[in-house]
């Protein structure tokens, strides 16, 4: 029984718990055992709340026995990224500056998960303040790709993606500012959804770039991605950017027939160099979808190449402002300093890592007097162009298919010496955040050496439901992604 | 961007940086600004800057005062405090 639990979908676990075929304590122990056995190698988690999970599992068990337990995620273990606030549980954002900090409240998404009966198992590793594409910028050491421990899991939500691929939990949450859910989902061979801006509450998500940040789920089964969105894709009065009118609905989603679906292929993709495995996965997917009756149209995103420089002005600008609060007064370790200014400088100089400092400096620069128009204002206009490209494209197609990232998971250290080569990993995901629309990464197969290859589906504003319904059909076509080959596999 | 420029930005950013860090940042700024230059080829005549996503989807609500339920837990998270006060280095000085 225990071995089977690990490979089950969240939906099956929740219904087995509801029918009393398995107890929440058994579920918790199975996944905690898996984490104990393998996280020493993968290092997906910064904190495992063993005591809290077992206590909550026992409470749930008592409620199930009394017939009082309800919830979409009854007894389902969930891991959340370490920039999502969990009351009384360490939340570091992968940064020394928040080491030891325990939030006084739960993020709205955490409240929603708990209300649906989920077990919050632990907190996932990430690049510091979500700035990075490999988890190599975590102050607590990188997470390894469970499909090949010598390679990165992607980032910044690398821990969340690796946790699902390693069967530490069937569902995890990450955040995506420029690709931080979709790129690690591709690298670890699982599903990852970046919802439309405003579909999921950001209350309790530690802010990086507020106009781009969005929380979303990872899962190995498409139905679990739908389940997670049913739980967290709800309006929140505590987030002023939470969509109140025209929200996508997540109940009653069913596989969408691919016949008649108009899929856009982006002409400008040919301007970028793709790994051979990525290119052939894209071609293979086109053939398979065509076989199912989908039709393909060429669409143009003329400002695709401008999205990356635009993003690296807008996101650091917002970050330089958002990270001003880590000052040794409100947050952070304290220090002895003769003045407040010295306290700020010292605490921030010691507490932030190199990439975070780099982005704060860039953000300060592009917003500083004399440079604002040339950089920030120009980037904000370019952002309008990137968004209108998508508007035009979606007048000719229902969704867009393109690679999630141009390459396969890379090796540790390969890109840390040249920050721009790291940034290029997100060249196909960033435009989606700039436009505020939704994107989903799914596993489209494996390279010759067994590395997962992900492809991205992009939907228009609020078409998250369409992406999920198509994902349900794609799973019938491509199969459920393999768990990572860590040993002790499922029978 | 020269080292003086980097020093000035570090001051504005309230970051104490070592000489090595500043040198590394100077090199990075050179590369990233070259990259930003790609935007200068765009024709932005008449293009409105981005100001946020559709307000029709996110109408404002009534602003209601609510009390914070866990005052003590919040205070516990502060770096330095004295009772219910946040402790900082001296700000006001005699002249």
Image: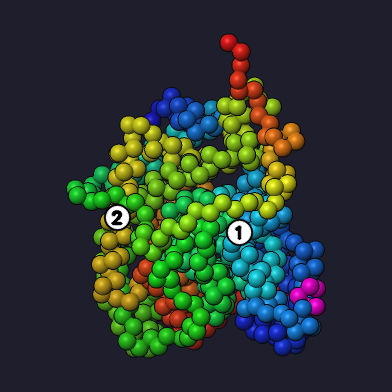
| Residue at 49%, 69% in the rendered image | A193
Quarter containing the N terminus of chain A: bottom right
Residue A151 in the image, given as x and y percentages of width and height: 57, 60
Give the vertical position of A95 relative to B8 (above or below).
below
The residue pinned by badge 2 equals A384
| Mark 2 or 1, nearer chain start | 1
The majority secondary structure of the magenta stretch comes to helix
Q: In which quarter of the image is residue A351?
A: top right
State the extent of the magenta-drawn residues as a range: A58-62
Quarter containing the C terminus of chain A: bottom right
Q: Mark 2 lies on which chain?
A: A
Front in this rendered view, residue A110 or A33: A110
Q: In which quarter of the image is residue A266?
A: bottom left
Residue A370 part of the magenta-drawn span: no
Give me the C-alpha separation between circle 2 and circle 1.
31 Å
Front in this rendered view, residue B55 or A186: B55
Residue A466 in the image, given as x and y percentages of width and height: 41, 78
Give the vertical position of A399 relative to A429 (above or below).
below
Colour scheme shown: rainbow
Total residue callouts: 2
Q: How crowded is mark 2: few (under 14 residues within 10 Å), some or many (20 or more)?
A: some
Relative placement, left or right, of A229 versus A263 is right
| Residue at 62%, 39% in the rendered image | A330
Give the vertical position of A37 relative to A16 (above or below).
above
Q: Mark 1 lies on which chain?
A: A
Front in this rendered view, residue B20 or A299: A299
Circle on res. A107 = 1
| Residue at 71%, 76% in the rendered image | A75
Q: Can residue A478 be seen in this view?
A: no
Relative placement, left or right, of A205 versus B77 is left
């Amino acid at each position: 029984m225990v071995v089977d639990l690990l490979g089950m979908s969240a939906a099956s676990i929740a219904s087995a718990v509801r029918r009393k075929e398995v107890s929440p304590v058994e579920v918790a122990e199975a996944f905690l055992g898996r984490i104990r056995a393998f996280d020493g190698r993968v290092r997906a988690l910064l904190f495992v709340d063993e005591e809290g999970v077992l206590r909550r599992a026992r409470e749930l068990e008592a409620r199930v026995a009394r017939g009082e337990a309800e919830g979409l995620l009854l007894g389902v273990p969930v891991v959340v990224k370490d920039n999502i606030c969990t009351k009384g549980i360490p939340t570091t954002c992968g940064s020394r500056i928040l080491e030891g900090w325990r939030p006084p409240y739960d993020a709205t998404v955490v409240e929603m998960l708990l209300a649906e009966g989920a077990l919050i198992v632990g907190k996932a590793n990430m690049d510091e303040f979500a700035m990075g594409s490999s988890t190599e910028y975590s102050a607590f050491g990188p997470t390894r790709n469970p499909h090949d421990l010598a390679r990165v899991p992607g980032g910044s939500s690398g821990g969340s993606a690796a946790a699902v691929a390693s069967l530490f939990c069937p569902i995890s949450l990450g955040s995506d500012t420029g690709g931080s859910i979709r790129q690690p989902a591709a690298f670890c061979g699982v599903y990852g959804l970046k919802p439309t801006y405003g579909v999921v509450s950001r209350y309790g998500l530690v802010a990086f770039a507020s106009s781009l940040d969005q929380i979303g789920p990872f899962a190995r089964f498409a139905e679990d991605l739908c389940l997670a969105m049913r739980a967290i894709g709800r309006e929140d009065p505590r987030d002023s950017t939470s969509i109140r009118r025209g929200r996508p609905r997540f109940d009653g989603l069913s596989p969408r027939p691919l016949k008649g679906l108009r899929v856009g292929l982006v002409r400008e993709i040919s301007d970028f160099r793709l790994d051979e495995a990525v290119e052939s996965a894209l071609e293979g997917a086109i053939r398979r979808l065509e076989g199912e009756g989908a039709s393909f149209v060429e669409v143009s995103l003329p400002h695709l190449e401008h999205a990356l420089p635009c993003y690296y002005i807008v996101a650091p600008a917002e970050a330089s402002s958002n990270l001003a609060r880590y000052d040794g007064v409100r947050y952070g370790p304290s220090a002895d300093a003769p003045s407040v200014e010295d306290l700020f400088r010292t605490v921030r100089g010691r507490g932030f890592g190199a990439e975070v400092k780099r982005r704060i400096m860039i953000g300060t620069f592009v917003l500083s007097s004399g440079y604002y128009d040339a950089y920030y204002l120009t980037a904000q206009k370019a952002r309008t162009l990137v968004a209108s490209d998508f508007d035009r494209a979606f007048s000719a197609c229902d969704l867009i298919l393109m690679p999630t990232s141009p390459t396969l998971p890379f090796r540790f250290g390969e890109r840390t010496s040249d920050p721009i080569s790291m940034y290029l990993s997100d060249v196909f995901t960033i435009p989606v955040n700039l436009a505020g629309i939704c994107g989903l990464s799914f596993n489209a197969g494996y390279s010759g050496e067994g590395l997962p290859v992900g492809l991205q589906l992009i939907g228009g504003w609020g078409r998250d439901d369409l992406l999920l319904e198509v994902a349900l059909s794609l799973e019938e076509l491509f199969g459920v992604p393999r768990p990572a080959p860590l040993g002790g596999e499922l029978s | 961007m020269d080292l003086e420029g980097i020093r000035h930005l570090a001051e504005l950013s309230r970051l104490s940086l070592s000489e090595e860090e500043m040198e590394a940042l100077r090199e990075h700024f050179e590369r990233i600004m070259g990259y930003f230059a790609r935007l200068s080829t765009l024709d932005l005549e008449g293009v409105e800057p981005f100001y946020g996503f559709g307000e029709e989807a996110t109408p404002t609500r009534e602003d209601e005062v609510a009390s914070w339920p866990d005052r003590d837990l919040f205070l516990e998270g502060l770096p330095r405090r004295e009772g219910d006060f946040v402790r900082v280095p001296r700000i006001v000085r005699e002249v």
